[in-house]
Amino acid sequence: MTGAPDAVELRPKLVGQRVRRTEDPRLLAGAGRYVDDLTPPGALHVAIRRSDQPHARIRGIGATEALALPGVVAVFDARDLEGMIRPAIPASRMAGYHATPIWPLARGTVRYVGEPVVAVLAESRYVAEDALELVAIDYEPLPFAIRAADAAADGAPLLHEDAGTNVIIAREFARGDVDAVFRDAPVIVGGRFRMTRKTAVAMENRSYLAAWDRGRAALTLHSSTNIPGIIRDVLAGCLELPGNRLRVVAPDVGGSFGGKGSLYQEEMLVAALARRLERPVKFTSDRLEDLSATSQAFDEVIEAELALDAEGMLLGLRAEVTGDIGAYSIYPWTGALEPVQVASFLPGPYRLAHYRGRVRGVLTPKPPTGPYRGVGRPSSTFAMERLIDMAARKLGMDPMEIRRRNLVTAPEFPYRTASGIVWDRSAFQECLAAACDHADYPALLRARDAARAAGRWVGIGLASYAELTGIGSRISVAPGMPINTGTETAAIRIDATGAVTAAFGIASHGQGLETTLAQVIADELGCRMEDVEVQHGDSALLPASSGTYASRSAVLAGGAATLSARVVKAKLLRAAAHLMDVPAEALEASGGIIRARSSNTSMSFQEVAQAVYAGMGRIPREQREELTASETYDPYLGTAGSATHLAMVEIDPGTYGVTVTRYVVAEDCGRIINPLIVDGQVQGGVAQGIGAALLEEVVHDDDGQCVTASLADYLVPIATGMPEIGIVHVEAVLPATLGGFRGMGEGGTIGAPAAIANAVADALSPLGIEVDTLPVTPDRIFRMVEAARLRNPGQRTGA
Amino acid sequence: MKPAPFDYLRAESVAHAVQSLADAGGDGKVIAGGQSLMPMMNFRLVKPSLLVDINHIPDLAGIRQQGGRLGIGALVRHRTTAADPVIARHVPVLHAAMRHVAHLTVRNRGTFCGSVCHADPAAEMPMIALLLDGTVQTATPRGGRRLPARDFFLGPLMTALEPDELVTEIEMDTLPADTGWGFEEFARRHGDYALAAVAVTVDRQDGRAAGPRIAVMGVGDRPMRMPEAEAALDGSDMGEAAIDAAVEALRATIAPNADLHASADYRRHLAGVLAGRALRGAWTRARERLAA
Ligand SMILES: Cc1cc2nc3c(=O)[nH]c(=O)nc-3n(C[C@H](O)[C@H](O)[C@H](O)COP(=O)(O)OP(=O)(O)OC[C@H]3O[C@@H](n4cnc5c(N)ncnc54)[C@H](O)[C@@H]3O)c2cc1C
């Protein structure tokens, strides 16, 4: 463990231990507090009438009957909100981009089924829903193109007239002379890969509660969001309220996976209505609304070709990415977030000189796409790893060997990818080797071949990837986004009782950051974990904050915690030195006790704190310092997290059901703060990625209706369907981040779809079938097998 | 997802229940386990004005075996059906089917009779009732009826029940120990409604199939028996050719719908695969029937 310039002291401490999550007793025993648990007296409940039209002009809205229903307090549509709130604008510096404004309710035109149109406020949600049925909306249907390819075509009906096009995002990444390389390349493989639309399906649905304090003219919004700081800042503009009279609190949040990481119309709505009506206003989405109006993900077609030499060395890659971004650009990330990252991450962890990736983001009448665990990389990794396996097959080369030859090696770091991303250093090669070792790859190949000889459909798939984590202020998390997401502040104080409180701008929503940050702080300060209270998810804690997303919190908040704790500790030791009459350098702290190394005198944190704050004159006036610090950490660049996933699957040759029989992840997340939590993140991510690979798909029919708006139709993975997941933590050369941490919350969903796709393709390879669409469902396998049967009538294709 | 307003009535007896349904004039609904009804009410797909709760009516929770028939009362939960030793021994095909029904929480409340009344075309229990020549025993204010299962299912979520008719028990054949049976199901995830399932029973006499019964689900608007396939097998040696012929007959009979999860062609293929497996399994289990 060398290489980190600011490594924490090398005493065996809490960092690195499998400390149990301190959040869990609260969350598992039902003592958590989610937004929907909060119902202040006098609260009004909102139910929303949503568009049942993909694209239509609103000719009229009739609410008289709804208003007459006992218990209904008010009915609002966009006209009633004029002047109450300004729209949010998802701005970007990207050339040629068009920002579509976000209003709380549809203004004149609806653009997707599920878009909020009318809000009913009532004394209960039941009554509000009764009233919804009485609202009459008169629509004039407008033409639309529901598929991105049609929407991008010349002359397609426009979703936003003023944009003048449905293609509001277009960008190109290029390096070298890719066309020349393709002209002479001995081996070329290509495909048209499709990662279908997904949605995050957090266990807790989105929920918002706004309360207006008439006396203070101040608004508090409780929101199930993972970006409370960003929401505060944007709403301050929309509502024209200063930050000291607008507070956004994310209490316990039951998962997000990206789905709660953007501004929502309902957040704007409850805020505006609470101020207008001077009553608390609450909206809790139900599952139907969650599945039809929470931000969705992926929905890309990636047409890509890979050129290689005869030894299997990558020569060039070219790709056209079309992203179906839905009806609006999302705040703050914009609709560019997902598809542009597909193009920028497509070259992956490989040495590749020549690349051209073009990407378009196309408006269609569907819910907006937004962040989803892994952003862009689940799709890019799927396409690239499929190409690598297709090339290996064409060359007759082992999939492990072709990766070994092409993954960037240690001496090449820092490596600038063909799209301009810099891999600082990460265990690309070591993860590949570790995954194969752990699974006993040669034995697995023999087992597969034996099964195949017995007529079984068994396959093995590898996927290697790298991602950028802990991104600092040098790089925008989303392309051209004008919001700084690259810094994080920790305000740490030791109070008059000697207790430690640490406030952050992050917003943990299942990651266990209360535990991991307390580990870091306790180590730095020399106190016990239980002495440390971690606060987060509240815009009032710090002057500026953003939240938890993009695998940033452990790196950025961990770094800020380290910096602040060091300052507080220095102050504490100076005070103790005075009180104990020894030089500060002679003192050390552990377990909440400060000891002099040379003598056996000691003082507890509590005794020192009491002396500092309450003990009149015990510390001379000019030496007295508050035991507080507020330091900001900015890693400036980011650091690469990387992994190799290995999956083995068996396909039933009759039903085409896919069973994952083996799964191994070898990953490098730098210094591990808490292996228990890292394991949990890997397992959850892999489960989610298996869902993306085999089950999950948001489907809109040709009429623009979402036909997967219940959990009977949008299938998420369930625990009993999960394989045992072997996890190897590869801690190679640590990154230059403070503490040597890398982000790792998203990796599972990045590697798993590709690994499963490759394993399924391997199992089907005797039939000459390649997998190009996820999820690879039994029905899709059936159709591929049928097509293969037509191609090779003689071949045996199962039961 | 909140239901429309409704009144709730806790029925104390079968007579009380059916009279209350009659009084509601066609606008009342029985609630048993609520595992299908409540989701439909929350989606506002059904808006009964009155819910008649039968959960507190005494003597409806029994399972009885009598003269080659098994009776399952209106309040027998899936959990009980799945664990009952009499069912495991005498109706093993039902026991096997229950492994595929939903998840623990749903099984704790859902009822066999409720499932049959709900008549989902991809639910296991209606198919088993049909396979085993079940009879639905009902009560109304005008007296009861005994409805053969083959006349009971009219379409998706549609049955022959009158609005004021309560099912009190469903009866079906038990299987003699030498009868072979098979049950095969495929769902996207374990516990989901099936994409298709096939259940069969067959006796073996002089090395030949006797009285085979084949039922399928998930491939039509209701569970179905497959008389053509049954006829193709009856008296056969149950060899691969005979089974293939039955599978082909089955595939030719059904006209599955396409939906989100499966195309019609895949469903037809799948039903055939499952039928072949169920028949092979049943034949392996069947033992030579001794002449009576
Ligand atoms: C997540 C989930 C997964 C499921 N998976 C499966 C599955 O894999 N396979 C499967 O078969 N089922 C499945 N189900 C449905 C479950 O089995 C239901 O419990 C069952 O279909 C209905 O039984 P119930 O007692 O809950 O009926 P209820 O929901 O109470 O009633 C259903 C209908 O039957 C009527 N009814 C009920 N009892 C009577 C009666 N005695 N007389 C007259 N009418 C009556 C009601 O009025 C209503 O119309 C699932 C349900 C859920 C929620």
Image (tube, coloured by chain):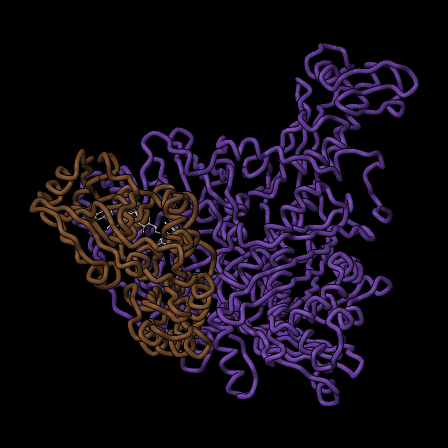
Chain colours: A purple, B brown
Classify residue A278 by image quadrant. Answer: top left
The residue at 40%/73% (across/down) is B263
Tell which residue pokes out farthest to the left in this image: B142
Residue occupying image coordinates x 53% and y 71%:
A653
Quadrant into which the C terminus of chain B falls: bottom left
Residue B195 is left or right of residue A318, and the answer is left
Quarter of the image where one finds residue A136: bottom left
For residue A605, say whether it is visible: yes
Seen in the picture, residue A211 relative to A365 is either above or below; the reply is above
Please count the marks in the image. 0
Q: Residue A458, position in %: x, y?
A: 62, 68
Nearer the observer, A451 or B258: A451
User: Does A23 sit above or below residue A144?
Assistant: above
The image position of residue A541, as x and y in percent, is 58, 35
- Seen in the image, is A638 located left or right of residue A258? right
Q: Is residue A788 above or below residue A570?
A: below
In-image side of A695 versus A618 (left or right): left
Q: Give the x, y percent position of residue A89.
A: 48, 57
Q: Residue furthest front?
A: B291
Picture layout, residue A248 above or below residue B159: above
Decide which of A175, B128 is in the foreground and name it: B128
- Residue at image coords 22%, 57%: A61
Q: Residue furthest right?
A: A598
Q: Nearer the viewer, residue A247 or A431?
A: A431
| Closest to the observer, A14 or A589 | A14
